[in-house]
Image (cartoon, helix red, strand yellow):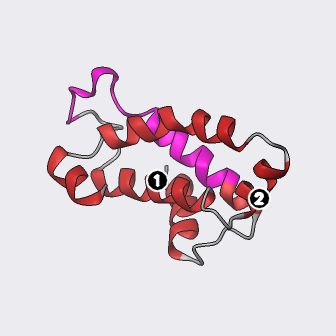
Amino acid sequence: MPALLRTIEELVSGDRRVKDYALGVEAVAAAALLAGCVPEGHEHPGAALRPSADIAIAALRAIDTAYADDSIPTELAAEDANLRERLAAVEPVRQLLRAAIPPLQRETLF
């Protein structure tokens, strides 16, 4: 888990434009792995591997940063004409991460 968090932190703490394609892909993959830790039905707030709200927020920001308008992953996806498909593919990850954030915190973020 610490390596996943470092990857996400590296992406969200640096320049908002992802210049390193590999870092963007790693951060989105890390976010997806963290989303997989959200319990089915989201009804188990004490689950051992459930990401904290802060981690879920950072993972969401990593996805946003990786797919910002001027990022390398976005530019490459646009060139391949599959940006919509890539964004659609990460939407379930975003939904699971949002489920890990308590409603009051979710309202202030999004």
Q: Amino acid at mark 2?
A: Glu
Instruction: Give the residues drawn in magenta, as a range.
Output: 25-46
Identity of the residue drawn at 27% across and 46% down: 101
Task: Give percent across and percent down for residue 4.
Answer: 54, 53
Q: Main secondary structure of the magenta part?
A: helix
Task: Give percent across and percent down for residue 48.
Answer: 30, 36
- Mark 1 or 2 closer to N-term? 1
Confirm whether the magenta stretch covers residue 41: yes
Task: Give percent across and percent down for residue 107.
Answer: 21, 52
Identify the residue position indicated by label 1 in the image: 59
Q: Circle 2 sits in a helix, a strand or a loop, which is it?
A: helix
Residue 55: name its quadrant. Answer: bottom left
Identity of the residue drawn at 57% across and 77% down: 14
Identity of the residue drawn at 27% across and 28% down: 42
Q: Amino acid at mark 1?
A: Ala
In the displayed structure, 13 sits above or below 39; it is below
Identify the residue position indicated by label 2 in the image: 75
Residue 65: name its quadrant. Answer: bottom right
Q: Is residue 2 left or right of residue 106?
A: right
